[in-house]
C-alpha cells in the first residue's frame, strides 16, 4: 500500500523532491511522514526552519486526508505552534483525523524528532472541493 501512496503523492514535488519528505505509514485518517534533516533545512540558529516543519506537517495531513479516497480535500485553515527545537536528525509528523464530515474535516498533526522531542503541533481544517 505504501508503494501506491508514494506513487499518488509523487506529484507533490515540493514536499517529496524539494523537502525530501517520505511516507512511513498510513491508513484512512492517519499518516506518518518523515524528513531526514539536511543542512538546507536548518535556520541560522542551527535548528530546523519553521517552513520545513510546516511543510512536513501539511504533507502528513495531505496523505492522511487524501490517501484513501477519491475526494479532493484541501487545507482551509492551518494553525501551527512550534514547541521546541529538534535535537535529532529526523523529523516525524503524525496526522490523525479528529472529525470528518461531508465537506469539512479536522486533523491534528504532531511533529517530533526521532529522540522524542515534541517539536510542533498543528491543527488543520480541511475542505472537500470535489
Image (spheres, rainbow, N blue to C red):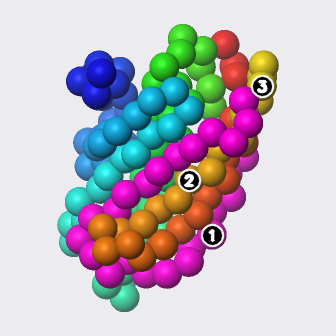
Image location (x, y in percent) of residue 26: 40, 34
Q: Which residue occupies 57% across, 44% down?
A: 96
Q: Quadrant of the N terminus?
A: top left
Of badges 1 and 2, nearer the viewer stands 2
Are circles 2 and 3 on residues that touch, CB within 8 Å? no
Check disc 3 and report the residue beneath it: 101
103 in relation to 125, above or below: above
Image point 73% across, 36% down: which residue? 99
Quadrant location, the C terminus:
top right
In the displayed structure, would residue 68 be above or below residue 110? above
Residue 113 position by quadrant: bottom left
Q: Say which quarter of the image contains residue 31.
A: top left
Near mark 3 (Cα within 10 A), the count class, few <14, some 14-19 or many ≥20, is few
- Residue at x 62% of width, y 51% of height: 108
Task: Tell whether 128 sits left or right of 40.
Answer: right
Near-viewer residue (27 or 53): 27
> In this orientation, does residue 48 appear?
no
Which residue is under mark 1? 81
Distance of mark 1 from mark 2, alpha carbons?
Answer: 10 Å
Amino acid at each position: 500500500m505504501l508503494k501506491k501512496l508514494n506513487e499518488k503523492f509523487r506529484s507533490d514535488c515540493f514536499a517529496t523532491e524539494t523537502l525530501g519528505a517520505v511516507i512511513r505509514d498510513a491508513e484512512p485518517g492517519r499518516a506518518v511522514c518523515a524528513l531526514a534533516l539536511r543542512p538546507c533545512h536548518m535556520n541560522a540558529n542551527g535548528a530546523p526552519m519553521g517552513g520545513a516543519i510546516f511543510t512536513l506537517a501539511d504533507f502528513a495531513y495531505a496523505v492522511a486526508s487524501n490517501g484513501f479516497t477519491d475526494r479532493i480535500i484541501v487545507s482551509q485553515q492551518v494553525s501551527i505552534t512550534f514547541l521546541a527545537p529538534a535535537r535529532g536528525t529526523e523529523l516525524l509528523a503524525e496526522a490523525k483525523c479528529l472529525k470528518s464530515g461531508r465537506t469539512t474535516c479536522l486533523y491534528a498533526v504532531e511533529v517530533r524528532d526521532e529522540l522524542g522531542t515534541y517539536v510542533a503541533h498543528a491543527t488543520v481544517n480541511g475542505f472537500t472541493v470535489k
